[in-house]
Amino acid sequence: MSNDKFEYRKDVAFINREKELAFLKSCIDERSESILFLHGPKSSGKTTLLYKFFNQIEKEQKMDVKFLNLRKVLIGNYKDFLEMFFGVDYSRSKEDVKEKREYDFKFFKLSVEVLKGIKQGELDPFFIMEKEFIRLNKKGIKPVLIIDELQALDNIYLNNGRDRQLIIELFNFFVAMTKESHLAHIIISSSDGYFIDRVFIDSRLKKCSKFYRIDYLPKQDVMEWLLNLEKYSKIKDYTLSEEDAEKIWQTVGGSMWEIQDILSELFHTPLDEVTRLYKKKMRSLIVDYVVKPEQKKIEKLLRRFVDRDELSKEEINSEEEELLRDMVRQNILYFDPAEATYYPQGKSYHHGIRLYFTNTLEKFAKKNKDLRKRL
């Protein structure tokens, strides 16, 4: 997030999202009955939205808001998870200042004795978290947990056995805290469509979860932003015409990160050159992905997106699903679990796919033409 103590020639913009913010607020204004999962394509603004929401509600009275962005931390094992979630509460401890600095920003702050018990496996961390939620509720304070990119905890197991997967235990705990005991609001965000799909098809989790898609900005909001750069991005060095804004929309659509990237390039490069290079770059990304032993099978699948924007899971077989799954992992495609549908990862990737096949056909036609001349 931007820091008001510094001035830049371009700032990070936050555009509209009033509907999404209102939805999030309405969820925590009700009694907690389900886990809320936010999903959506990469660079659709999920993390920025969560930071904005966090800043809006963290200072509200009668609310204890904890926000953890798992992109910011390295978690390789269960010990890392404990180090990240639990720290010392120095209102209950006489430890020195050096140790206080070390533990000052943990998710849950505990006494030194309790923290030691958790790390040694003598105390259940989920029981400790539940006790903290009960304590807050008794004081009339509403706990809210916001976790971004929870899939970072996938494939981590509890120390007392590889049969107990951490993320499954977390889900069980979140169900208990929301649907069963109504002690806390849990908001989880992920851009990994297959991770969300695992939750969506799990009958127990599906019955106690809400799924809300955060999509790219609509054209109306993008045009409002690009035609008012000083207002939204603090850009004074240049302005854009409606034609310029339309070119950017046609290149990257409502992907906020990519729009920000283009705006940075415009300080030193003409717009037409920026959009040309952007499309060329996206085609190169597709070429780099396609050229492998499975090239013909990959091309067959990607070709379906040349004249369409989506592909339903009902239209594919199991072998194709494995290839599509890899395309999702590599951010070529986005999978929406609620719709069971695949989409290109935004307009820019859609351009890359189309340009790949356009150039391939042109090269094939030229090759045939040269061959006929020689004959």
Image (cartoon, rainbow, N blue to C red):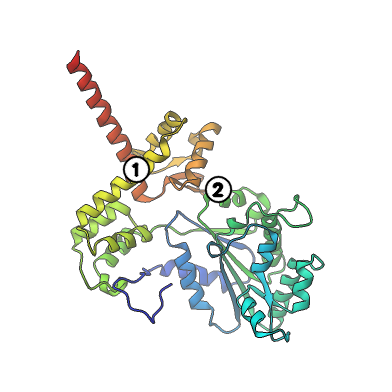
Residue 317 seen by the camera:
no
- Residue position for label 1: 284
| Residue 8 coordinates in the image, percent (x, y) | 32, 74
Instruction: Tell me residue 331's x, y (percent).
Output: 45, 48
- Residue 369 appearing in the image: yes
Give the vertical position of 62 relative to 299 (above or below): below
Circle 2: residue type: Tyr
Q: Quadrant of residue 210?
A: bottom right
Q: Please tell me in which quadrant of the rendered image residue 140 appears.
A: bottom right
Left or right of residue 264: residue 145: right
Q: Check disc 2 and report the residue beneath it.
A: 194
Which type of secondary structure does the marked residue at label 2 adopt? helix
Looking at the image, is 327 positioned above or below residue 14? above
Viewer-nearest residue: 88 or 300: 88
Percent across and percent down for residue 4 are 39, 80
The residue tagged with tag 1: helix, strand or loop?
A: helix
Query: Neighbour class for label 1 at 10 Å: few (<14), some, many (≥20)?
Result: some
Q: Nearer the viewer, mark 2 or mark 1?
A: 1
| Contact check, label 2 and label 1, Cβ < 8 Å | no
Q: For the residue marked with disc 1, what is the amino acid? A: Ser
At horizontal 76% and vertical 50% (from top left) the residue drawn is 163
Determine crowd level at label 2: few under 14, some 14-19, many 20+ residues with C-alpha closer than 10 A.
some
